[in-house]
Each structure stands twice: as structure tokens, then as C-alpha cells.
Amino acid sequence: MSLLDHQLELLAPAKTAEIGREAILHGADAVYIGGPAFGARHNASNPIEDIAGLVEFAHRYRARIFVTFNTILHDAELEAARKQIWDLYEAGVDALIVQDMGLLELDLPPIQLHASTQCDIRTVDKARFLGGVGFSQLVLARELTLDQIRAVRAAVDTPLEYFVHGALCVAFSGQCYISHADTGRSANRGDCSQACRLPYTLTDGQGRVVAYEKHLLSMKDNDQSRNLEALVDAGIRSFKIEGRYKDMGYVKNITGHYRRLLDDMLERRPEFQRASSGSTRLLFTPDVDKNFHRGHTDYFAQGRQPDIGAFDSPKYVGVELGTVVRLGADHIDLVTNSSMANGDGLNYMLKRATAGIQANRVEKLGEDAEGERWRVFPNEHMSTLAGLKVGTVIHRNRDHHWEAALTKKSSERKVRLDLALGEHAGGLRLTLRDEDGIESITDAALVLEPAQQAAQAEANLRASLAKLGNTMFEAGTVELALSQAWFVPAAVINGLRRDAIAAQEAARLAAWERPPRKGPADPAPAYPDTQLTYLANVYNAKARAFYEKHGVQLIAAAYEAHEEAGEVSLMITKHCLRFSFNLCPKQAKGVQGVQGQVRAEPMTLVSGEERYTLRFDCKPCEMHVVGAIKPGILHAPPPSAIPYSPLVFHRQRPRT
């Protein structure tokens, strides 16, 4: 079904179908996953058969499955893309998340389309246009504030989706070309080299060093936990967790965390309901600090913040555990705030980097007013642990006990089921009706004989019917609509219950309605601009035809077409290094001695042999990282500029 305005959808990532199933069990209302090709995470692809199995599992819970199809496509790939989309549709997929507008010009099945965050949806006009051409859901830019989201919601009736957790790309999604310029690996084609996580030196126009060897383009991780209700009130209906490269433990933990937050809100806000069926019971306590992260930020949701960057390190420091109180010849003694386990991963800061320690074996020494005392025997030789001394603060970035708990069954999801046992001419009839109003009837042939002990017989029947065990259901009411108490052998009632549960699951799948693709508005809406630069990512003739149909007169080719030989904006970002170092003109206004520094431009970023100029567009408050494509890449064939064949395509997948 399409997302309705009173429904709130928790959307979780899945690297594999197995992780997708666990995401649903841990509370996801929808899952997004990569197909065989054309997704923006090239190492997170899945075969059609696996996706079909995930679809069937999800639909039992009224959860939806979206497949990422959000790369830009070369002309040589369009036919393969069309065929794959038909395969996905036949596998039951509910929607595709797309970036390339050329797909809208293909002979597609009536599958719903969602506009990817790669479409760079930052304005009311862009959102209104994409809704008008047939998109059923819009993934807004991560950089939008609550006020900007509210403005978009007031102007469109298309459901809005927003990233609430996970790693942040520093650039506006779809507006980063630095990877392709330097390595030939295109972020818009699913192969980003992550230049944003490298260390850089920042200098001003006079060559003075503003920051030395810092990770100046590396952002903290997105965490909108405190803003969920505000996002609902602003108009967001789908809450998306980033992480199609993440492991099972991350997806279980973060999905469970947001499921709890949303369920708490739904109890307070009865005007809303979850977008899928059932209730989730977690068998662990979610903790967002236990998984890899670079620190937490709510980014721009509440406006520009001073501390959104993870400049010191792009690595995971972990949760503060305790302090070194003694160093032995082969061990470290710690005072900690929680218990430890063999195999824990520890670290500490060594100058501007993190130094790791693997706890091979740990012994508890006792407890006192300061905390627990532990002796740690590290895998590493003590002489290699440079800078470690008494008083050093220790963090734990791998909690062995906690991670082990997530390798086991860690959640249950149950759909309420009412059962009514009655009679028919040839025996018993069991009628099931679930919380969604779906009903099934199953009969069992039996010669009915009166029970000798009526009360005991009825009690046994009720108990047997309510034993739903490891099924997806939990018993609500159990009604015995019998003319009298009958003797029913345990094997008969148990078999009837099993057959009825199978029939109910089949009925739920049969009742699932997949809405068709949303039709375009008539007359066709005009695109907000009549000219497009390389920033529009037009990489094939179908995309060009799409924009021409919607009033665009001048269309430049995508950056990957290798037609931009000079310096251009390789990255456009809301993150501003002048602001980060208190050099913004707005910050400097009226501050003695700062105005001259602000005017000391252009600023330059240097990483190894790579050198970029920074330009600042103060009206929209954006920073441009400017550079040129390397000559060797410029003169190489554009990605996939070869005739398509299945063999060639699959060999090339790691590079697209």
C-alpha cells in the first residue's frame, strides 16, 4: 500500500535479505535493499531470488520492500536496467528508489518510484515537480531544517522521507564529484572513494595554516532521536536509517532503538499509527553508542550548529569505559564504570589518533567507591602501547557481551490473532481473524463425541488453540462456539491449529495489494529551471528527453561524461569551514581583528598531492570545493561507454 498521512514508517537498511528479515523482526515497517545492480552501494547487491523471499516475509507483516536503483545510467545500461526492473516487479518489490530521470522514459512495469536523496531535493519547487511527474515518495536532503521541511510539506501531497540516523555525506547527495575527478570512481554510480574521510590541511589566501592534517570534510553521524516528534509535526512520514553496508548487529540495534522511540510517541499521539502490522518485543536494550559512529549530530534539523564535524578522527572511539590506574609488565589495571569480558576492544587517544587494545583476557579485581576494578591482559605487548600511562582514559569500541547477545534471537514480532472454534457437519471449524481484519476458515474432519469432563475438555481446547509458539501470531481472544463440550484428541486440535495458521499466512499474502505507479500530472509540470549544468547528472539520452519534455532547453552532460575539463565545483556542501573556525563574516561582524582574516581568501584544502580551492556562497550559506578532473581520467572512456553484454556487465560491477 502507499504510505498514508496518518501512518509513520520506520525504514531500515539491509545489506542482505537475511539482515532485511531481522530488520522487520526488530520493528521496521519497510526495508530498502540493493538488487543485482544499479544501486548506489556496489558491494551491497542481492540476487532476485533472495529479494523475492524477503518480499514474501515482509508482506506477512504488511511491511514494504524497496530496492535501490539510484545510480545514473549510461545509454548502454538502459536495456539491462529495464529488464532488471521487470524482474524486481515480478518478485513482488513494492517500490524502486531512483535518481536517473531516464528511467521514467522506459517501458516500466507499474511499480512505484521513490525519488532518491541523490535527486537533491532541497526546494519546494523541486519537490512539487518530482511529485508531479509520478514519484510516490520523496527522500528529502539531509541538510533541510525543520522549517524547510514544513514548507515542503505545505506545498506537496507526496509522502516525505528523511534520514534520521547513520553516516553523513558532507556534500549534498548527488552533488559530489571529487571521487570521480581524482580516482575515476563515481559516487553517482555507486563507487565513492570517500575522499571526505581523508585528513586535510586548510590554508588561507596568504598561505597561513588554519588547520593541519585534520579530517575537515568528515561529519559526525546523523542522530535525530531527539527530533522525531518535531519531524512528524513538520510533515515527515518515513524515517530512514542509513546503512546498507552495515552488519546485522547495527541494523538490529538501531532499528530497535527507533522502534521504541516511535512506539512511545504513538502511545501519546493516537492520531498516528505504525505503517505495518504487529508489535515488537526486543530481547535486549538498544544503545546507539554501542555501534560504530563518529559522534552524534542532528546536523541542520535545528539550524546550523557549531560542532557537526568529526575532525579529529573518522574512526569509532567507542563508549568511555574507565581510567588506567596501574601498568604491569603484561597487564593494565583499570577502574571502570561497567563490567568487562574477554575479547573486548579498547582504545585511547594518542595525540590526534586512536590507539587500539584487544583485551585477550580480563580478571575482575573487585569494586570500590570509584567503580569496578579490572585487570586486562592485552593481545599486544605492553611495550607497543605508546603513550599509555596512569590516568589515560580508556574507551570500549567492542563490547563482547553486548555484541554476543545480538548474534542470538534478540526480538519477536507478533500479529494479534483472534480464534473461534466451531462445528460443521463433518467435524470442527477454526476461524481466524487478525488485527488487520483478514480472515481464514479451516476445517478438520472428526466424528464428534461428547467429553466426559466438559470443563476440563474446554480448558484443554482453549490452551491448545492459544499455543501459537514460534509463529508470527499471538493469541488475542479464544472463543469456543460449540453446541457442547466435545472430546477432541490433542493431535487433531494441534493439527487443525497448524493448518489454520498456514492458511492465515497465505490469506495475508493474498490480501496484500500493491498499488500501481503514480501517474504524472496532466498537463505535464514544467521543471523549475530551463537550463541544466553537469550538476543535474544527465548521463543518457532518455534522461535528456525527460527534461526536454518538461521544458528544459539547455542540458549539459553529467560530470561522468568527461566534458568538464576545467575547474568546477567537485563538492557542494552546507558544511562551512569558515564557520567551523570562526572565520565566517557573520561571526566576525563587529569582532576586533577578525575581519582581515575573513577576507584572506581563497582558502585551500590540501591532502597529499590533491589540492582544492574553497569558494563560499554566502547567500544560500554553502561551501564549494573546487578542482579539476585528472587528465588521465578525463581522456579515459566514460564509465560503461561500451556495448552492454551480461558477461561484461557482471565483470564490471565492482567498478560501477
Image: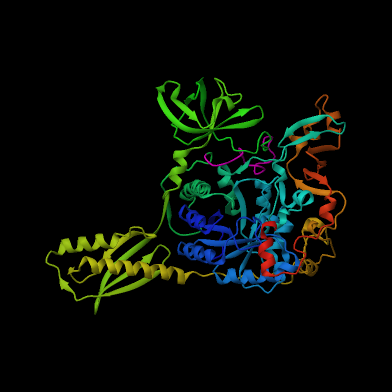
Q: Is the magenta stretch mostly helix, strand or loop?
A: loop
Q: Which of 376 and 233 is in front in this view?
A: 376
User: Please, is residue 538 above or below residue 393 in the view?
Assistant: below
Residue 175 visible in the shown view:
yes
Image-based side of 330 in relation to 281, left or right: right
Whether residue 157 is visible here, answered yes or no, is no
- Give the number of callouts: 0
x and y, in percent, of residue 72 in the image = 72, 61
**Residue 380 drawn in magenta:** no
In this image, 341 relative to 459: left or right?
right
- Between 617 and 577, the residue placed more toward the observer is 577
Taking the spot 45% from the left edge, 55% from the top edge, the residue there is: 25
Whether residue 295 is in magenta: the answer is yes
Q: Position of residue 451 (x, y in %)?
A: 14, 68
Question: What residue is shown at x 15% (from left), y 64% (from top)?
Answer: 454
- Which stretch is magenta? 290-307
The colour scheme of the drawn protein is rainbow
Measuring from the top left, give residue 280's x and y in whole percent.
43, 52
Image location of residue 256, percent across then percent down: 48, 48
Classify the position of the N terminus by image quarter: bottom right
In this rendered view, identify the residue nearer to me: 546 or 637.
637
In the orientation shown, which residue stands out farthest toward the bottom?
Answer: 425
